[in-house]
Amino acid sequence: MLGPTRCLLFGHGDISCNGRARCRKCSGYHDTEGCVREDHCLFCGPGHCPTSKQCLAHLQAVQLQELQHDGAHSLLDIK
């Protein structure tokens, strides 16, 4: 997982997450269970949920994480 399941933001994990919990379906500040709202990505807007594997922001975060962990690139090189 690229980010915590609590705030849905990338770059840190569940243990270090102090963010407010968000819905994994619509990105709202409520529990995912029972959510009846339309899918809405926190990063891209409507059309898919923020945890979708087709989300461009998710795909970019995966690529960034892979580059950081291959050891050949520093964070400055990647950005």
Image: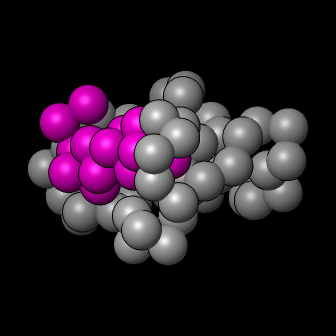
In percent of width and height, residue 41 lies at 31, 54
Question: Which is the main secondary structure of the residues drawn in magenta?
Answer: helix
Direction from residue 23 to residue 12 in the image, left or right: right
Where's the C terminus, which quadrant? bottom left
Q: Which residue is drawn at 50% across and 73% down?
A: 76
Segment colored magenta? 53-68
Q: In this view, does 7 lie to the left or right of 15?
A: left
Q: Which residue is drawn at 42% across and 68% down?
A: 77
Asked whether the viewer can see residue 75, the reply is: yes
Total marks shown come to 0
Q: For residue 36, what is the image quadrant? A: top left
Residue drawn where x is 29% and y is 51% of the image: 60
Q: Is residue 3 above or below residue 19?
A: above
- Magenta-colored stretch includes residue 56: yes
Q: Where is residue 75 in the image (x, y as percent from the top left)?
A: 53, 64
Q: Residue at x 32, y 43 (%)?
A: 63
For this rendering, which residue is in front, 45 or 78?
A: 78
Name the quarter where the N terminus is drawn. top right
Is 33 or 53 nearer to us in this picture? 53
* Residue 24 on the magenta segment: no
Residue 13 occupies which quadrant of the picture?
Answer: top right
Q: Nearer the viewer, residue 28 or 36?
A: 28
The residue at the far front in this view is: 72
Q: Position of residue 59 (x, y in %)?
A: 26, 43
Instruction: Say above or below: 29 vs 76.
Output: above
Considering depth in this image, is 7 or 70 the residue closer to the camera? 70
Q: Is residue 31 visible?
A: no
